[in-house]
Image (cartoon, grey):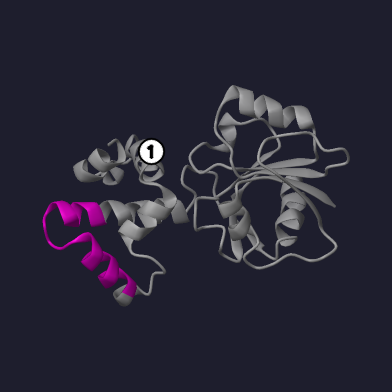
């Protein structure tokens, strides 16, 4: 199987966290370019735009996996597979994904090439993990705004009390606060419990 991965160095390192078998052919790219004989493309740098989608569909591989946390499959061409590839999430041995049809079988084989297992979840904005982490970060900002504690103290308390790998503010820096804000804003359109903290919004848009 020949896999093409469009990525940056940081996400590449995360994808390879569990290693990779020697017999897997992978071509690493920073920009989308056709590769003869490619079975699949994994776009970890996906940005929702007509131009980007057209470039990917023109490649005509058997499956296209995109790092796409907010946009659902109903807004994408048939055959696309969504992957939760926010910064720090690809380090996990489990890949959180959403897809339809026979392409899911191929996608599982591709993900297994990076020694990861696939967890298929509902095709909703934020998957599961991103929604939960965004909510935790949002609550931390509410706590900070109420002057209960400092960012460092909240991070320390969460790591010691819950055994999280990062505190909420550390996590927001790794993921990108604009990503957190964008997802919360989208989710809040149908559920007010996701309404972003005023302080989070201020920092995200600064």
From this viewpoint, is residue 101 visible?
no
Identify the residue at horizontal 82%, vertical 44% (top origin).
39
Give x and y (percent) for residue 34: 79, 34
Q: Which residue is mark 1?
A: 182
Identify the residue at horizontal 38%, vertical 38% (top origin).
182
Residue 146 lies in quadrant: bottom left
Q: Secondary structure at mark 1?
A: helix
Give x and y (percent) for residue 195: 27, 42
Give x and y (percent) for residue 72: 54, 37
From this viewpoint, is residue 117 visible?
yes
Screen quadrant of the C terminus:
top left
Q: Specify the segment rendered in magenta.
A: 140-159
> Is 206 in front, or is 135?
206
Give x and y (percent) for residue 156: 28, 71
Residue extending furthest right?
A: 37
Residue extending furthest left?
A: 147
Q: Is residue 176 above or below residue 73?
A: below
Identify the residue at horizontal 64%, vertical 28% (top origin).
53
Relative horizontal placement of residue 159, taking residue 125 as reference (left or right): left
> Is 20 in front, or is 74?
20
Relative horizontal placement of residue 46, taking residue 58 as reference (left or right): left
Q: Is residue 50 above or below residue 96?
A: above
- Does the magenta portion include 141? yes
Q: Is residue 152 above or below residue 141?
A: below
Identify the residue at horizontal 15%, vertical 51% (top origin).
145
- Mark 1 neighbour class, 10 Å CA radius: few under 14, some 14 to 19, many 20 or more: some
Q: Which secondary structure is most common in the magenta stretch?
A: helix
């Amino acid at each position: 199987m020949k896999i093409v991965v469009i990525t940056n160095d940081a996400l590449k390192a995360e994808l390879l966290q569990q290693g990779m078998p020697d017999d897997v052919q992978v071509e690493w790219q920073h920009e989308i370019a056709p590769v003869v004989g490619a079975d699949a493309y994994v776009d970890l740098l996906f940005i929702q735009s007509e131009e980007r989608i057209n470039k990917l569909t023109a490649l005509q591989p058997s499956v296209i996996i995109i790092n796409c946390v907010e946009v659902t499959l109903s807004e994408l061409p048939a055959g696309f597979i969504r992957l939760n590839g926010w910064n720090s999430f690809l380090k996990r041995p489990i890949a959180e994904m959403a897809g339809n049809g026979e392409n899911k079988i191929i996608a599982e084989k591709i993900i297994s090439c990076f020694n990861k297992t696939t967890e298929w979840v509902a095709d909703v904005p934020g998957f599961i993990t991103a929604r939960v982490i965004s909510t935790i970060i949002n609550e931390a900002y509410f706590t900070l705004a109420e002057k209960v504690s400092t960012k460092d103290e909240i991070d320390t308390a969460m790591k010691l009390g819950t055994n999280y790998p990062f505190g909420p503010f550390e996590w927001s820096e790794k993921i990108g606060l604009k990503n957190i804000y964008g997802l919360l804003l989208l989710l809040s359109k149908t559920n007010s419990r996701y309404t972003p903290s005023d302080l989070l919004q201020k920092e995200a848009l600064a």
